Image (tube, rainbow, N blue to C red):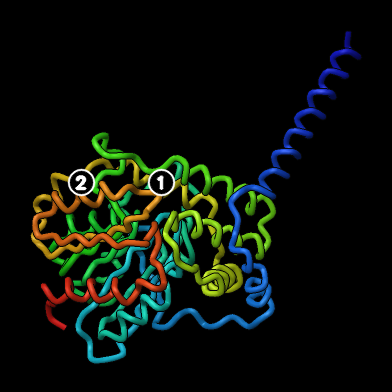
Amino acid sequence: MKRLLIRSLKFIGIALLVILILLATALFFYGPGVPQDADMTIDSVLQSDLPELLQGQTGYVDSGETKIWYESIPPATPSKGTVLLFMGISNDALGWPPSFLNALTDAGYQVIRFDYRGTGLSDWDNDWGENPYSLEDLALDAVAILDEEDIDQAHIIGVSMGGMVAQEFAIHHPHRTLTLTLMMSSGNIVDGALPPISQDVTLELILASVKYGIIPTERNTIKLHIAAREILSGDADYELDVEETAQQVLYNLRHRNGYNSQASQQHQNAVFRSGSRYSALRRLELPTLIIHGLDDPFIPIEHSQKLGRTIPDSTTMWFENMGHDLPPYLIDSLIAELILNFEKNPGES
């Protein structure tokens, strides 16, 4: 009887191993991938000296007991004000395309970007499970940066989850907010009256994480980020800047703290616990620009449409051939709309 049990367990173990090997093989060949010519570009980046990706003065600020890293980039011309940037889920400050930053500074704006807690060079909370932080906490981190830099007011820009943090900032600190820009975001991600975030895209992102994350070499980590960008671009037809993405990822791996595998879960938890902001958003009295891509595969455009109906002084812009991303070819058009919104309430430069 004992021998039979041992044989059965061995058989089950071998069968599970075979299944795992087959699944891994299928995922390798058929799972989410990268553009066909990406390997050559990745090879070149891996073998070349990395460019310096920081453009301004960097520093740390204490937000409660959490240390937050930030960068303040000066304007190329006399200052017209300050722009404070909130990136998407589990992304650090380097997620902002250099062309986006350069366009803002060339237009005369000081730009501040920062690493969310749990990412980049900001503190990674090992006790998060006992005391999870909220979207409002992330907004308070940004307030601490403005205080440190002695900046009274700023134009606030948020992308995806960053748009939700930006809403928290504007709701709780309206006197610090000159204008608000929300890109591909939501006022309540679990709004039962709206289509939910795409489970298909979520599954694809998970499969990409498995495919490239099991063996987290520099090459695989770069491929993971490129594959995620490809997934989030949806049906939009534009060429991803593979070299720029590879350089950003490698810079994070070699010159910063790399990537926190827990950040996505922590940020997702903060998003789903945040609830609805509709009532508070109806009381906002500041120029608001709402932007969404018509090809966004992740957050349905209905979420931005409802934001437009909810926030009183808001303008909506829907861009064709734009997914859940900031397409390189659209940067100039996006910046032009942002500046028009800034000029509605320029503040004191």
Question: Disc 1 vs disc 2: Cβ atoms closer than 8 Å?
Answer: no
Any mark on residue 268, and which? 1
| Whether residue 265 is visible | yes
- 104 with respect to 116 (left or right): left
Q: Specify the amino acid type for callout 2.
A: Arg
Q: Residue 27 placed where, x, y %? A: 66, 45
Residue underneath mark 2: 277
Q: Residue at x 19, y 60 (%)?
A: 316
Quarter of the view holding residue 191: top left
Q: Residue 109 placed where, x, y %? A: 26, 81
Q: Residue 146 placed where, x, y %? A: 26, 71
Q: Secondary structure at mark 2?
A: loop
Q: Residue 330 placed where, x, y %? A: 35, 71
Q: Specify the amino acid type for callout 1.
A: Gln
Q: Nearer the viewer, residue 41 or 254?
A: 41
Q: Nearer the viewer, residue 83 or 287?
A: 287
Q: Residue at x 9, y 55 (%)?
A: 312
Q: Residue furthest bottom?
A: 77
The Cα–Cα distance between marks 1 and 2, rounded to whole angstroms, is 16 Å
Q: Residue furthest top?
A: 1
Quarter of the view holding residue 286: bottom left
Alpha-carbon neighbours of circle 1 within 10 Å: few (<14), some, or many (≥20)?
Answer: some
Relative to 35, say whether 57 is above or below.
Answer: below
- 207 with respect to 183 (left or right): right
Q: Secondary structure at mark 1?
A: helix
- 27 with respect to 120 (left or right): right
| Whether residue 139 is visible | no
Question: Where, quadrant-wise, is the C terminus in this rendering?
Answer: bottom left
